[in-house]
Image (cartoon, helix red, strand yellow):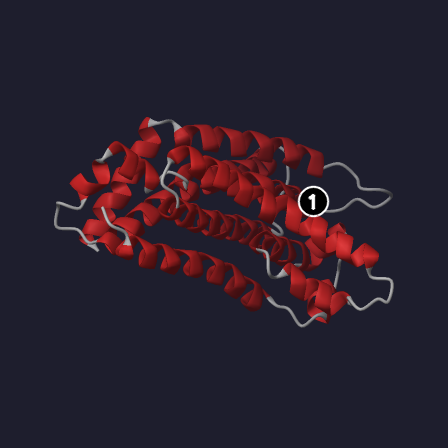
Amino acid sequence: MKMIWIIAVKELRDGLRNRWIAAAIILLASLAIVLSLMGSAPTGSVKVSALDVTVINLASLSVYLIPLIALMLSFDALVGEFERGTMLLLLTYPVTRWQVIMGKFFGHVLILFIAIFAGYGSALLFMVMVGGGSFEGWQAYFTMMTSSLLLGAVFVALGYLVSVLVKERATAIGSAIGLWLIFVVLYDLLLFGALLLDKQQVIDQKLFLTLMLISPTDSYRILNLSMFDGVSQSAGIAGLASNAGLNSGILFGVILMWIITPLVATLYIFKQREL
């Protein structure tokens, strides 16, 4: 654990030096504050909770932004080290390959943790202190921040898998962008296209939600938009997840599976790879 922590701190320092953390905090905080101001406006003829609307807006934003930040952090974590020749030097120290992977992983997740909780947390404080709001509904907001961190960890792990499979950094960039498009854009388009073409109504609500669970981004959406009454009512999908037999434990479990599986695959491939 000592070596893992040393590598994690090194990645954190690199993030500080490269301004990754500062840029992510400023970006997330700015967008979160803007969306929190939008959330205080009436929706239709009903005045809904500003915090509930902010959770909906930030969850929708995070599906696009958090995976992109995570992939940009991780896509060259291994292939970049190989290209620069620093991986061989690193492994001359008393450190194993799995410690290198896990150290980098915890370091990048720590960067995301600081960015998400500082950025989104500042928006919550802004609403309470400046906007005259309250902490009512903080559970949904905290769940959104925690699940955003887990979503980022998913794409850090996927970025490592790309990074260990390719031979060049340029290929890793293209593959990372492809992953982002598949999970954030294309899968949902295919799913809704299949729904539109389903004239026989084979795809019912339960099957549709099950198919959504295949994607970590959709699992994140369902978790944040349907697990809390105020948010689900504001989003217009009250009771959707419960009717399909889904709960927060299942949804968190699916997201955790998406973290563990790519990490295990990366560890196995990296162990077999010749330096």
The percent position of residue 234, horizontal first and vertical second, equals 75, 51
Residue 30 lies in what quarter of the image? top right
Tell me what residue is drawn at x 33 percent, y 49 percent. 106
Q: Residues within 10 Å of mark 1 (few under 14, many from 20)?
A: many
Identify residue for label 1: 53
- In the depicted view, which residue is nearer to us: 194 or 141? 194
Answer left or right for 245 relative to 9.
right
Up/down of 264 relative to 133, above or below: below
Residue type (three-letter) at the residue carrying disc 1: Val
Number of labels in the image equals 1
x and y percentages locating residue 39 in the rendered image: 70, 38
Viewer can see residue 135:
no
- Percent x, y for residue 148? 52, 48
State which quarter of the image contains the N terminus: bottom left
Which residue: 13% across, 46% down?
A: 93
Q: Could one spot residue 182 in this view of the protein? A: yes
- Give the camera-side residue of 222 and 229: 222
Would residue 236 be found to the left or right of residue 36 on screen?
right
Give me the residue at 45% from left, 28% from top. 23
- Front residue of 231/47: it is 231
Give the structural element (helix, strand or loop) at label 1: helix
- Residue ID at (44%, 37%): 171
Q: Where residue 135 appears, x then y in whole percent?
A: 59, 47
Q: Is residue 84 left or right of residue 145?
A: left
